[in-house]
Image (cartoon, rainbow, N blue to C red):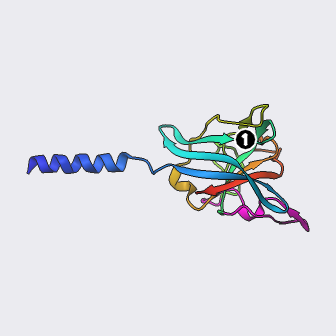
Amino acid sequence: MRLSLLLTAGLVLATTGAGAAPLVFELHKIDPQGVGASLGTVTAADGPAGLVLTPDLKGLPPGPHGFHVHETPACGPGEKDGKPAAGLAAGSHYDPAKTGQHLGPEGAGHLGDLPLLTVAADGGTQTAVTAKRLHVADLAGRALVIHAEADNYADQPGGGRIACGVAK
């Protein structure tokens, strides 16, 4: 009896301590006309300090880019100010608590802000970023979006949407 209780307790601890299976997002170039060629993947996995997003991307403009979780798993274009715009089908930044605040990846605002994604001079990036307030389970039914410019999470938006992906 005692052995079976110990085995059961061990099994429960082993299964509840395991994080969710990683998700792989295939990111595509996007523009006002729609979704284009694949740029590669971003793998999302739970880590000890939060959600680890590991890109394997090519074909992006060099430099820092705003990187966000958006609420809808779609990447098609939409209309903004009467003009077609890339990736608006992805909706707004992921904000389950309805904070309406853009305070950065470590702030108390919405959860959609991720650390900046830095792209090398050759247009590629394999540098992982960690989102301390997120887990793989938060990404189900969401889109990842890369913006044209850096984002300071306050008064400088990340510019237009240039890449988008949903989990495979």
Q: Main secondary structure of the magenta part?
A: loop
Task: Give the SS element for disc 1.
Answer: loop
Residue identified by numbered label 1: 58
10 Å neighbourhood of mark 1: few (<14), some, or many (≥20)?
some
**Residue segment shown in magenta:** 74-98
Looking at the image, which residue sits at the far left?
1
Going by the image, does 149 lie left or right of 45? right
Going by the image, does 167 lie left or right of 60? left
- Residue at x 79% of width, y 53% of height: 161
Looking at the image, which residue sits at the far front?
37
Where, by quadrant of the figure, is residue 126 drawn? top right
Magenta segment includes 150: no
The image shows residue 16 at horizontal and vertical percentages of 35, 50
The image shows residue 27 at horizontal and vertical percentages of 68, 51
Amino acid at pointer 1: Lys
Q: Is residue 75 above or below residue 38?
A: below
Looking at the image, which residue sits at the far right?
82
Front-most of 57 and 87? 57
Front-most of 133 and 141? 141
Magenta segment includes 84: yes
Where, by quadrant of the figure, is residue 120 drawn? top right
The image shows residue 34 at horizontal and vertical percentages of 80, 62
The image shows residue 81 at horizontal and vertical percentages of 90, 65
Quadrant including the C terminus: bottom right
Could one spot residue 91 in this view of the protein? no
- Residue at x 52% of width, y 51% of height: 136
Could one spot residue 130 in this view of the protein? yes
- Counting the numbered discs, the total is 1
- Residue at x 51% of width, y 37% of height: 49
- Residue at x 83% of width, y 49% of height: 159
